[in-house]
């Protein structure tokens, strides 16, 4: 599911005083957990940077652009989209451009409805998750396989997992995404556990339904506690790593909560953070010396 987001959305996300800040944060949360792929036009990103620079300085404007590049796909605004907007019934030219881009992607109606409901404060996480999954009905499972094979792998993941397994750590993926992709990573890198949202598949196609309980922020924290009990690990000895607001309950519960390349709100709340290096930087938070890491 792709959601095309405009300049106002980008500003609403980062400026708490704006009326739609809470609604924008809700949509941003859906992007963070993988239920929506956020897409912005290069022009929207440029405009948001310009406005933020005027209000809060160049450093803040650049910081927001960098965060957006981590979270959203960026698409160019071409002549075709501009032409469609100029002759559309949209009262706002930028909205018309975004509508044209969404319609070319085949999700125009869904995007408009979801965005309108979120801006009215009507979206509940679980309800919206159900709706996102319903949009996947009929998708061939081979598409999921292709996505899994082409998943972008976070820098330092392979090295981190190799060393954690060597020294005896138990590892788990607790994700608001889908088990299909979590299991792929489990098989490739050797995670001990995967808990995510399971999509129902029948006769090689997605049914548009999910199985079991939605893994949201509350559920992640609950799963962390249960895993520690099962493995007879004191919760104070657990480590949690996350980047989105949906990870905060888990980060706050763990003995060591690390915000990894996270959004400002998460970095401000987590006790530790990593912003410039890969996942293997976590090894140093665990007190593992270079001599042991490089064995």
Image (cartoon, rainbow, N blue to C red):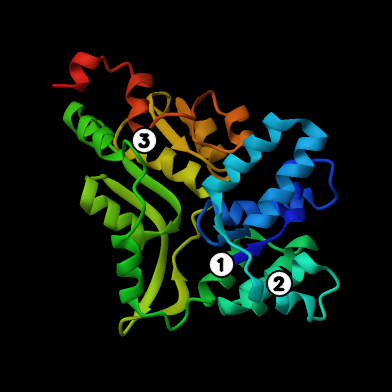
Q: What residue did someone put label 3 on? A: 228
Give the secondary structure at mark 2.
helix
Quadrant in which the C terminus appears: top left
Q: Nearer the viewer, mark 1 or mark 3?
A: 1
Spatial separation of the CA atoms under disc 3 and disc 2: 54 Å
Q: Which tag, 1 or 3, sits closer to the chain's start?
A: 1
Q: Residue at x 51, y 34 (%)?
A: 251
Q: Residues within 10 Å of mark 3 (few under 14, many from 20)?
A: some
Q: Nearer the viewer, mark 1 or mark 2?
A: 2
Task: Quadrant for residue 292, please give it.
Answer: top left
149 vs 153: above or below: below
Task: Quadrant for residue 42, please give it.
Answer: bottom right
195 vs 139: above or below: above
Q: Position of residue 108 (x, y in %)?
A: 64, 77
Mark number, residue 2 = 1
Q: Which tag, 3 or 2, sits closer to the chain's start?
A: 2
Q: Which tag, 1 or 2, sits closer to the chain's start?
A: 1
Spatial separation of the CA atoms under disc 1 and disc 2: 20 Å
Spatial separation of the CA atoms under disc 1 and disc 3: 36 Å
Residue nearest the observer in this picture, 46 or 20 = 46
Q: Is residue 60 left or right of residue 163?
A: right
Give the secondary structure at mark 1.
strand
Q: Residue at x 71, y 32 (%)?
A: 58
Q: What residue did someone put label 2 on? A: 82
Q: Is residue 235 left or right of residue 23?
A: left
Q: Residue at x 36, y 77 (%)?
A: 201
């Amino acid at each position: 599911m792709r959601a095309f987001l405009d300049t106002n959305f980008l500003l609403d996300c980062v400026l708490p005083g704006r009326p739609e800040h809470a609604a924008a944060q809700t949509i941003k949360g859906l992007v963070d957990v993988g239920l929506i792929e956020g897409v912005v036009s290069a022009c929207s990103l440029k405009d948001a940077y310009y406005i933020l620079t005027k209000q809060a300085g160049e450093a803040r404007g650049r910081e927001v652009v960098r965060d957006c590049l981590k979270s959203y796909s960026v698409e160019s605004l071409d002549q075709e989209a501009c032409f469609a907007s100029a002759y559309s019934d949209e009262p706002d030219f930028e909205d018309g451009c975004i509508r044209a881009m969404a319609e070319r992607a085949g999700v125009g109606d869904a995007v408009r409805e979801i965005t309108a409901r979120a801006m009215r404060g009507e979206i509940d996480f679980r309800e919206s998750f159900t709706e996102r999954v319903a949009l996947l009905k009929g998708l061939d499972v081979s598409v999921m396989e292709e996505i899994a094979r082409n998943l972008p792998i976070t820098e330092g993941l392979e090295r981190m997992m190799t060393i954690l397994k060597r020294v005896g750590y138990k590892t788990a993926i607790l994700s608001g995404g889908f088990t299909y992709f979590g299991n792929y990573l489990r098989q490739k890198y050797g995670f001990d556990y995967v808990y995510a949202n399971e999509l129902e598949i029948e006769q090689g196609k997605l049914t548009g339904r999910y199985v079991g309980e939605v893994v949201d922020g509350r559920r992640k924290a609950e799963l962390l506690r249960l895993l520690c009990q099962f493995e007879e690990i004191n919760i104070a000895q657990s480590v949690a790593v996350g980047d989105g607001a949906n990870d905060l309950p888990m980060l706050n519960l763990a003995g060591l909560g690390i915000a990894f390349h996270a959004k400002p709100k998460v970095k401000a709340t987590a006790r530790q953070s990593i912003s410039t290096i890969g996942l293997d930087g976590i090894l140093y938070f665990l007190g593992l010396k270079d001599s042991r890491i490089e064995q």
